[in-house]
Amino acid sequence: MKNFVSILLSLVVLSSCLSTKKTMPTALSDTRYLIKKIDKKNSWYIIYAERKDTLYKIVSYADNGINENCKKIVVGRRYDFDLKSKKENAPMIGDVKLDPVGYTGCYQFDDKTTICLEPKRGIYDLFYTNNLKGICYLK
């Protein structure tokens, strides 16, 4: 009987350890963005990243001053980003957020580059982050 109790107790402890291991990566991945695709348009990188079944379109200036210590982001890997909304950071007068007149769902980033939202893909905003310089990841 003593052996049966110790075997049962061992199985309970082992199963709880295994179930904890299974949930840890999921919990960690919920806070990180999975890089799905990286495009470049003129002097701008367009990074598609996914978190919790939501696709984000991140825009980052393609800085030519990248050094050899650059840790380039990689498609298929996850990163912590502190995303900032382009729409929510629109200019304000007093407490009123200004919406551009004739807004077409596109943003002009320089004289040659327009980057648009993609409602058909569920992208209703563009984002930027201080965690990226070009495609170099900054912690």
Image (spheres, grey):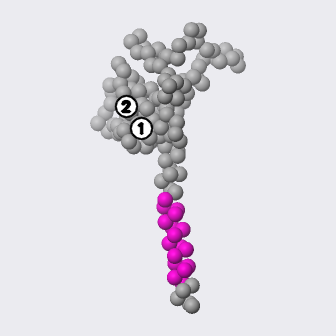
Mark 1: which secondary structure? strand
Mark 2: which secondary structure? strand
Cβ atoms under marks 2 and 1 closer than 8 Å: yes
Q: Is residue 133 visible?
A: no
Which span is picked out in magenta?
6-22
Quarter of the picture containing the C terminus is: top left
Closer to us: 80 or 10: 10
- Say which residue appears at 52% left-offset and 33% top-offset: 83
Type of secondary structure dominating the magenta stretch: helix
Reply above or below: 104 against 7: above
- Say which residue appears at 44% left-offset and 41% top-offset: 34
Closer to us: 107 or 19: 19
Report the amino acid beneath label 1: Ile
- Residue extending farthest right: 95
| Disc number placed over residue 35 in the picture, else none | 1
Tell whether position 7 is magenta: yes
- Residue extending farthest bottom: 1
Closer to us: 83 or 7: 7
Report the amino acid beneath label 2: Ile
Residue at image mark 2: 38
Q: Is residue 115 visible?
A: yes
Tell whether position 91 is magenta: no
Please indicate whether residue 88 sits to the left or right of residue 58 in the image: right
- Say which residue appears at 54% left-offset and 68% top-offset: 16
Quarter of the picture containing the N terminus is: bottom right
Q: Position of residue 8 (x, y in %)?
A: 55, 80
